[in-house]
Image: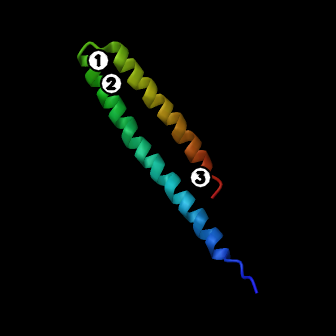
């Protein structure tokens, strides 16, 4: 007789939710670093580098918006 492990599906959902939450925090840390280094690049008259790092920070914010949207399904 075959038994389905319904707890397995539940635990997989919990694992997915947990990893997404982890990625959001991890990205938040990166966003802060990108902005900090953008400021440092500006101070060194590397305005193009600073602009690019700010763009990366903005892109990371968009990624986090998508991840936060994914969390609404849990």
Q: Are marks 1 and 3 in contact (CB under 8 Å)?
A: no
Q: Crowding near pointer 2: few (<14 within 10 Å), some, many (20+)? A: many
- Rendered location of residue 14, percent (x, y): 56, 64
Say which mark, if any, is on residue 31. none
From the viewer's perspective, is 21 left or right of 30?
A: right
Q: Residue at x 52, y 52 (%)?
A: 20
SS at mark 1 in the image: helix
Q: Crowding near pointer 1: few (<14 within 10 Å), some, many (20+)? A: some
- Which residue position holds label 3? 71
- Which residue position holds label 1? 42
N-terminal label among 1 and 3: 1
Q: What is the CA distance from the residue labelled 1 to the residue labelled 3?
A: 36 Å
Residue 65 vs 47, above or below: the answer is below
Q: Crowding near pointer 3: few (<14 within 10 Å), some, many (20+)? A: some
Q: Quadrant of the N terminus?
A: bottom right
- Rendered location of residue 33, percent (x, y): 33, 35
From the viewer's perspective, is 36 left or right of 20?
A: left
- Which residue position holds label 2? 38
Q: Quadrant of residue 29?
A: top left
Please give the count of numbered marks on the rendered protein.
3
Residue 7 vs 33, above or below: the answer is below
Q: Residue at x 62, y 72 (%)?
A: 8
SS at mark 2 in the image: helix
């Amino acid at each position: 007789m075959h038994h389905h492990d319904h707890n397995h599906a539940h635990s997989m959902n919990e694992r997915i939710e947990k990893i997404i939450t982890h990625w959001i925090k991890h990205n938040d840390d990166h966003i802060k670093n990108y902005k900090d280094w953008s400021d440092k690049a500006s101070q060194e008259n590397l305005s193009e580098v600073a602009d690019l790092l700010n763009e990366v920070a903005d892109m990371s914010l968009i990624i986090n918006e998508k991840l936060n949207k994914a969390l609404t399904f849990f």
